[in-house]
Amino acid sequence: MPTESQAATVTVRDRFLADHRRLEDLFERLLAAFKASDRELVEGLWSEFDAGLSAHMEAEESHLFPLLLASQPREVRTLAAEHKHIRARLIELGIAVDLHLRRLKEMQGFVEELRAHARHEDSILYRWADDHLGTAERTSLFGALTKCPGKTPRRRSAYADASSSSSAATSSSTFTGFVK
């Protein structure tokens, strides 16, 4: 868990953008494994990616969304809808991985959706957090983000409700904002 002195010197934006880069690098390795038809590697990388992305979103939802809600409720609702859409896509693509259905173009489209979402988060959420979070809140947030990679993916159970409501899943063209 990060110390308070680390939390005081690292911006929320820098920490979350670094995690975006980590997830994007992992996804690029996943795409390479798809292209090489390495099923075992695909399954392992997908599991790691799914767990990391899910925990990343959980950290934002539990530590940042409630704080931003008071001042920017519309933005929080939009970001939450984007997260719901991403979770639905994780389920859909995870099932395709489990069934060994090769959907390389769909996977490539998914990373574009993530990039757009990350730009949106950066423009609203991370910059706001850097201006408003104290050291204790950053320490807690960074701690939640640090434990991301070790989590077990829950795409079949916890996210089942995400795919049941098609009205809440926005199309990828509505995303305004995975930052490099």
Image (spheres, grey):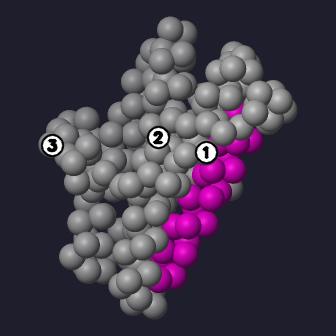
Report which quarter residue 119 is drawn in: top right
Indicate whether 111 appears above or below 35: above
Q: Quadrant of the C terminus?
A: bottom right
Q: Quadrant of the N terminus?
A: top right
Indicate whether 95 appears above or below 162: below
Indicate whether 106 appears above or below 88: below
Q: Earlier in the sequence, mark 2 or mark 1?
A: 2
Q: Viewed as shown, does residue 26 lie left or right of 49?
A: right
Q: Position of residue 158 (x, y in %)?
A: 26, 43
- Please tell me which residue is depicted at 19% across the width and 40% down the height of the picture: 161
Residue at image mark 2: 57
Q: Earlier in the sequence, mark 1 or mark 3?
A: 1
The one of 95 and 77 positioned closer to us in this rendering: 95
Give the secondary structure at mark 2. Answer: helix
The amino acid type, in three-letter code, at marker 2 is Met
The amino acid type, in three-letter code, at marker 3 is Ser
Question: Label for residue 164?
Answer: 3
Is residue 58 a member of the stretch shown in magenta?
Answer: no
Indicate whether 93 appears above or below 145: below
The amino acid type, in three-letter code, at marker 1 is Thr
Is residue 18 a member of the stretch shown in magenta?
Answer: yes
Report which quarter residue 164 is drawn in: top left
Q: Viewed as shown, does residue 132 lie left or right of 27?
A: right
Give the secondary structure at mark 3. Answer: helix
- Please tell me which residue is depicted at 53% across the width and 26% down the height of the picture: 63
Give the secondary structure at mark 1. Answer: helix
Q: Earlier in the sequence, mark 3 or mark 2?
A: 2
- Please tell me which residue is depicted at 45% across the width and 86% down the height of the picture: 35
Q: Which range of residues does the magenta coloring cover?
A: 12-34
Question: Label for residue 146?
Answer: 1
